Amino acid sequence: MKTAAHHWLRACAVLVLATTVDARANGQIVEQVKTYAISGTTAPELYASIGERGPKASVGRAIAHTNFKLTWQRKYEPQGDACTLVAAKPRLIITYTLPKPAGRLPAALQQRWDVFYEGVRRHELVHGEMIKQMVATIEKTTIGLSVPGDPGCKKIRQEITRPLSEASLAQRQQSSDFDRVELGDGGNVHRLILTFVNGQ
């Protein structure tokens, strides 16, 4: 999730808070949460600290961010004159980067923060689901793919790059469209920010 409201470039430490591993017969999904420390004793101060210390975005910094690392174990089998991808096991690591106050907050501010944080966290989880959907699409469009005239299983490795690229581009567009709605005027994240900072 990106916001163009800030342009600060200060770096900050990122800590791993929690990791969830979903081991499946056809692969493994690891979801982990990292936090970056922010400071302040008021909502505007905390939000300004996010602008100073949040993960880098294309313009300025973001409130939070979701990225991933995807690797595959693939099994190709020659079948006569052709080659077929008979199995593909993904290992997907999704990392959610979220803000966390470094110090104890006053009770009323903590309540406001909890609502804001949970809304941001849920937003990022949607990005995570989009990434999982991309992996499922790759599995659906590549496993069972067969390339004729490829007994050495060389052509097929190039052939599967097309559905891989298409799935990746679709996921990026879906993610961008989602952010545009959520961060736009009246969007869910836009309302979260206003409510947190201004108490609206």
Image (cartoon, rainbow, N blue to C red):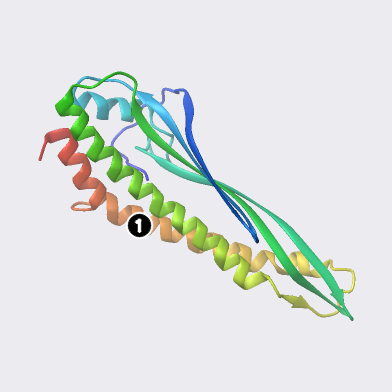
**In the image, 15: left or right of 52?**
right
**Toward which corner of the image does residue 78 lie, by quadrant?**
bottom right
Residue type at mark 1: give it. Answer: Phe
Q: Position of residue 102 (x, y in %)?
A: 34, 20
Q: Nearer the viewer, residue 165 or 125?
A: 125
**In the image, 66: left or right of 198?**
right
Q: Position of residue 122 (x, y in %)?
A: 34, 48
Q: Which residue is mark 1?
A: 178
**Toward which corner of the image does residue 83 lie, by quadrant?**
bottom right
If the image is split into quadrants, where does the N terminus sit? top left
Q: Nearer the viewer, residue 86 or 194?
A: 86
- Count of numbered circles on the image: 1
Identify which residue is drawn at 18% across, 21% down: 106
If the image is split into quadrants, where does the C terminus sit? top left
Q: Residues within 10 Å of mark 1 (few under 14, many from 20)?
A: some
Q: Position of residue 111 (x, y in %)?
A: 19, 33
Which element is circle 1 on? helix
Identify which residue is drawn at 42% across, 56% down: 175
Q: Position of residue 58 (x, y in %)?
A: 43, 41
Q: Is residue 157 above or below residue 45?
A: below
Q: Is residue 185 above or below residue 45?
A: below
- Looking at the image, which residue sits at the far left? 200
Identify which residue is drawn at 41% across, 26% down: 9
Q: Nearer the viewer, residue 32 or 8?
A: 32
Identify which residue is drawn at 35% across, 28% down: 100
